[in-house]
Image (cartoon, rainbow, N blue to C red):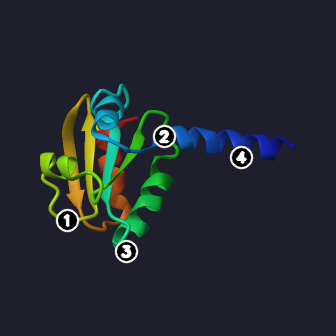
Amino acid sequence: MLKVIRRTLSTSAQCRKLITIKNDAEFIAKVMNSDNPVIVNFHAEWCEPCHILTPKMKELIQDSNTIDLAVVDVENHAELVETFEVKAVPAVLAIKNGLVVDKFIGLVDSNMIEKLIAKLDPQ
């Protein structure tokens, strides 16, 4: 019984950390104005590397109590793509206090993602 409860709590905590951006106002509220640092993953459904990178990032931030992950579909958010000069997907930005503090483009290894996380959450 305890394992079931623990799994449920873990899953619900992870759901709070994952933000699927629906519009520009939500991006401003949940990313740019967030008290927590946010990793923003610009992706597309047709992008195979995106389907590999997103689950890896979810896995790597699950131990952090402070970092959120926002997913932005480039097909539906042209204005955000233009604002952040996204030229290829996947494109990942690290945003803290409304500022981009780091970024990378393409499928990268876990070490690079961990370095990005460490810049946002240096525990």
Q: Residue at x 28, y 63 (%)?
A: 90
Residue with the mark numbered 4: 7
Within 10 Å of disc 2 (Cα), the crowding (few <14, some 14-19, many 20+) is many
User: Which secondary structure, mark 4?
Assistant: helix
First in sequence: mark 1 vs mark 4: 4
Q: Residue at x 55, y 43 (%)?
A: 15
Q: CA distance from mark 3 to mark 2?
A: 23 Å
Q: Amino acid at mark 3?
A: Glu
Q: Amino acid at mark 4?
A: Arg
Which residue ends up furthest to the right in the rendered image?
A: 1
Dot in front, 1 or 4: 1
x, y (%) of residue 11?
A: 63, 45
x, y (%) of residue 24?
A: 27, 39
Within 10 Å of disc 3 (Cα), the crowding (few <14, some 14-19, many 20+) is few
Q: Residue at x 30, y 33 (%)?
A: 25
Residue with the mark numbered 1: 88
Residue 48 marker = 3
First in sequence: mark 3 vs mark 2: 2
User: Which secondary structure, mark 1?
Assistant: loop
Q: CA distance from mark 1 to mark 4?
A: 36 Å
Quadrant location, the C terminus: top left
User: Which secondary structure, mark 3?
Assistant: helix
Residue with the mark numbered 2: 17
User: Badges 3 and 2: C-beta atoms under 8 Å apart?
Assistant: no
Q: Amino acid at mark 2?
A: Lys
Q: Is residue 36 left or right of residue 85?
A: right
